Amino acid sequence: MKKLDNILQIKENSINEVHEILLTGNVNGKILFISDEIVNGLYGEKVRKQLENLPDSTITTELISNNTLSYAMSFAEKIISMEVDYIVGLGGGKVLDVSKYAAYISKRPFIAIPTTVASDGVASPVAVLMRHDNKPMSLNCAMPTVIIIDVALIMDSPINLIKAGIGDTLSNYMALIDWEYACKKGKDEMNGFAYLMSQTALDALLKTKYTKICKDFIRVLADTHVMSGIAMSFSGSSRPVSGSEHMFSRALDYYCDAHNLHGIQVALGTVAILKLLGKDYTDVKDYLSQFEVDINPSRLGISRETFVKCMQAAPRTRKDRFTTLHTADLSTERLQSLYDELVREL
């Protein structure tokens, strides 16, 4: 089985440099190229031609049709039986999660070429796949060995995906508070390196000099997602970037009829829980407003009843994770009042 050193490339037009980047890693042999129909139509041929020019290489293309766990497992079986040397995934969250998990199970190096930065999934050691009942589940895997992010390509992606990416990094704010709280209560242990990396990612975003979405800002945002992925890798879990706000988002995935992007849901969870706890949430709220990231629960299609139900259900979505929600006032009256306040303020 072939080895591959870690490579990270985040720059403009890096999608045109895939051949040169992989040459430096001596990538050759049997390559499985995974994408989806839409992304393949936009960028597939450009990437595939570069892969075909790698020495002594044969390329097989697969277009994914879904992101279920069983589908990802079938991909892993195919990779093993085909004796694939490397996996190249080009696309958004579904493509990367299926590819990442299949690569992890088959123990092959994974080369990720994200076309969106809607979440830290571009670099995280976690794959979000769908269960048989069409509910999402998070599974541990490994970070991509190679990450190639083209900031110009990301800039051309749907703006709502970029805004979701902002929300996902800002949710580190709440995740770190929850981690410290769990450690204080003797419910978890701190990993200083992982904490520092998550905090650094958060600070890089909050303290950026850019006040609008532009290519330079995309570079900062992509950096924060990679740092968040490294934080998870250091800790061996998603703890540095996932706390009560992610548990609230998970409850929304289960109980809310409206389907919002993950990054938007965790951003709402961050502001809502900070306010619930009586903590200052001004910096986070103002930052989201500056980039026109709308987290008003009413406009997101989240009713007051659903908000209350999901906030109360959130602590039960992960039995292995203790957060501030476990000791917070989650009475129906308090949460109804919180919802009304959020609708007015946001």
Image (cartoon, helix red, strand yellow):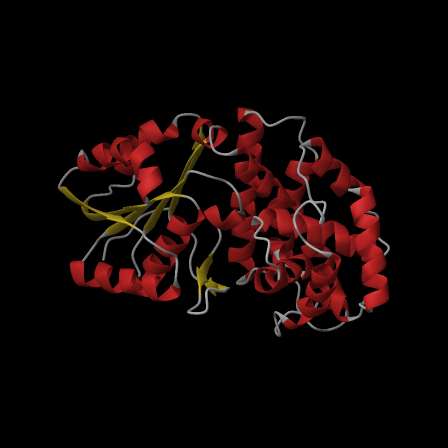
Between 185 and 212, the one lying in front of the other is 212
- What residue do we see at 76% from left, 56% from top? 273
Q: Looking at the image, is 17 positioned above or below residue 97?
A: above
Q: Looking at the image, is 289 positioned above or below residue 143?
A: above
Between 24 and 341, the one lying in front of the other is 341
- What residue do we see at 64% from left, 26% from top? 212
Judged left or right of residue 247, residue 99 is left
Q: Looking at the image, is 303 positioned above or below residue 20?
A: below
x and y percent of residue 264 in the render?
62, 47
x and y percent of residue 286 in the render?
76, 36
- What residue do we see at 64% from left, 37% from top? 204
Q: Is residue 123 visible?
A: no
Residue sitting at the far left: 56
The quadrant of the rendering that contains the C terminus is: top right
Judged left or right of residue 56, residue 95 is right
x and y percent of residue 128 in the render?
47, 58
